[in-house]
Image (spheres, rainbow, N blue to C red):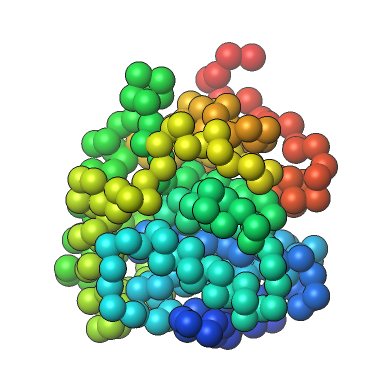
Amino acid sequence: MNSILLDLLGAQVRYRGREFRTRTIEVGEQNASKLILIHGVGGHAEAYSRNVQTLGQSYHAIAIDLLWHGLSSKPDFTPDMVPTYARQIIDILDDLGVQKASIEGESLGGWVAMFMALNHPDRVDKIILNTTAGVSWNRDAVNIDDAAGANLLRERSVAAIANPTRETIQKRLEWLMAYPDRVTEELIDLRYAIYTMPDTNAALAKVFANSFRRGADVRSGINESDLARISVPTLALWSDKNPGAGADVGERLAALVPGARHYCINDAGHWPQWEKPKEHDRVVLAFLDGRPLPEMAIAIGSAS
């Protein structure tokens, strides 16, 4: 794999927005269809550093820092984070002078994408839900392992922001990957630099306190029954080693969203776009272009 620097060589880093100041990493023609890429909680635009160049060959690919994250603005914190993030996305679209964009969201970013599709469908073309968070699942229908998923993420997130060292940040990043050695030294350096920025550190402490308490952001939470109201074309993009919510959760998501397509990337954790960028990009582009999705590989050890 290339370094983040080489992956982003030629990309444009800029700030967009009228209400908010959003840092973006952009590749692609300004008049091309827009594809907004949204990271998960505690993340930053470089979560898509391995994807923007390829996606930007066909679309105007725009990876962003969410509010209170990275180098984007830090307005007064509100526990209604997801509706505020939706305002941020609309603010970017207005700044771009476009009515609609496709949105790929990973984890928290997927929650934002679903919220946009449910509450602002006129501003959304298609959505890609990448190991998405934000859905209250029927625990009798899917296998949710809180110890390996939300609880461990909370523990490592709080530790990384309360005591940001290379070691605590590495452990936080390892939660994202199917295997720890996929966390590069450069990625640790980057996140350490971001987490030790005083304003970002203070803002993320509030984000984590809000995100990881029981019942957080309940007014914008999405129940399984809400998924039937998503009317925009949807891709449920999952992975076989997503911590705490494995492949069966992605299958259920696709089954509950009308007309949704489904793809599971094997040998990947919570960041399939980073761990398997070529496969991720092939699938996303096929979906956005309206082409058949590539055939899914059969995971080693699964039934043939």
Residue 195 at least partly seen: yes
The quadrant where residue 184 appears:
bottom left
In the rendered image, the vertical position of residue 168 relative to residue 16, given as above or below: above
Q: Locate residue 98 relative to residue 114 in the image: left or right.
A: right
Residue 275 visible: no
Task: Give the left or right position of residue 77, taking residue 268 as reference.
Answer: left
Q: Residue at x 34, y 30 (%)?
A: 144
Where residue 168 sits: x, y (%)?
A: 24, 62
The residue depicted at 73 percent of the width and 62 percent of the height is 54
For image coordinates 55% across by 33% down, the residue present is: 228
Q: Which residue shows up at 33% across the image and 50% down it?
A: 219
Residue 49 at x, y = what percent? 57, 67
On screen, residue 78 versus residue 107, left or right, reads left
Q: Nearer the viewer, residue 37 or 256?
A: 256
Q: Position of residue 133 (x, y in %)?
A: 41, 46
Instruction: Give the camera-side residue of 301 and 79.
Output: 79
Q: Nearer the viewer, residue 124 or 197?
A: 124
